[in-house]
Image (cartoon, rainbow, N blue to C red):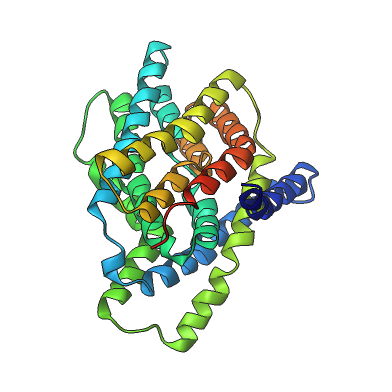
Amino acid sequence: MLDIFLQTLPFFAVIALGYGAGRTGFFTQEATAFLTKFVFYFALSAMLFRFAANLPLSEVWNGRLVGAYLWGTAFVYGIATIVALLRKQGMRRTAIEAQCAVIGNTGFLGVPMLVLLLGEQAIGPVMLALAVDLVVFSSLIVILMSIANEGRFDLSIFKTIGLGLLKNPMVVSMVLGLSWSATGAALPTPVNAFVTLLGDAATPGALFAIGASLAGKSTERLEVALWLSFCKLILHPAFVAIAAIFLFPLDPYSAGVIIAAAALPVAGNVYMLAQHFNVAPQRVSAAILVSTAISIVTVSLVIGWVSGFQSP
């Protein structure tokens, strides 16, 4: 377990470095925004495209894996929703809290860390988990916010959702990569070298950007942040594990990957959603900050546990 902690420590050390740079003002909020944009639209997209393009389609789709991750995520989403409604938070705040409880930093933290620690075979399961987050739960919050704002359900919301997915570089890069993979042709050497070079910037860039963005986060409503962190770091991987082991039995390796993916801290894009809809941004900010700090220990423990699962 100590060995796993020492392997994950450099990832969190880069996050801490970014946090220090942001906290001292050496890295401004404007600089953080531009770094995040570079990682999101270029470096991470190049990494996802390369992984997808070099991955046989037979190793990507796994209906049981999607079922397990979706069931475990939906179960925790339901728990967070019920608790928020019992606290009389209203639909808008309830939707935001439920999103915090299940949407992890799979893109910026999970892809580079899990692929490095668990092997490149992890990219297929990680991409499916990321797809469930983006397609199902990112769409769900848009639908719920639309109902809360308009007081009714309008089918035109699906046009907004569709356009949003088409504009998401992670979705586009995965689709383009898998489309290339479907041809059965290898990436031309210059293209592969290009996306490898650009994609290699994703890991340090994303981790530093996470830390720098945390520098502007506050710990308002700490008790709520702790509850949402418990949902994300403990309940989410626990229920995904139950689903992956008992309800939708997966091979040990794939189960381990999605359990580790579920253990990641609250994603920064939930804060962007909170700002966009003007719903409890400080509450989300606190959940991101607290869950990321605690995850230094919890993520190491989960990865240490699942790394003992049988490799493919």
Q: Nearer the viewer, residue 192 or 254?
A: 254
- Image side of residue 11 versus residue 47, left or right: right
Q: Nearer the viewer, residue 203 or 147?
A: 203
Residue displayed at 47% across by 81% down: 192
The answer to which image quadrant residue 300 occupies is: top right
- Residue 103: horizontal and vertical position, in percent? 44, 40
- How many numbered dots are placed on residues in this image? 0
Determine the residue located farthest toward the left in the rendered image.
Answer: 155
Residue displayed at 19% across by 39% down: 155
- Image side of residue 166 versus residue 256, left or right: left
Residue displayed at 62% across by 39% down: 297
- Residue 302: horizontal and vertical position, in percent? 52, 43
Question: Considering only vertical position in the picture, is 262 above or below 184?
Answer: above
- Residue 74: horizontal and vertical position, in percent? 32, 34
Quadrant location of the C terminus?
bottom left
The answer to which image quadrant residue 248 occupies is: top left
Question: Considering only vertical position in the picture, is 64 above or below 52?
Answer: above
- Image side of residue 70 versus residue 105, left or right: left
- Residue 51: horizontal and vertical position, in percent? 43, 69
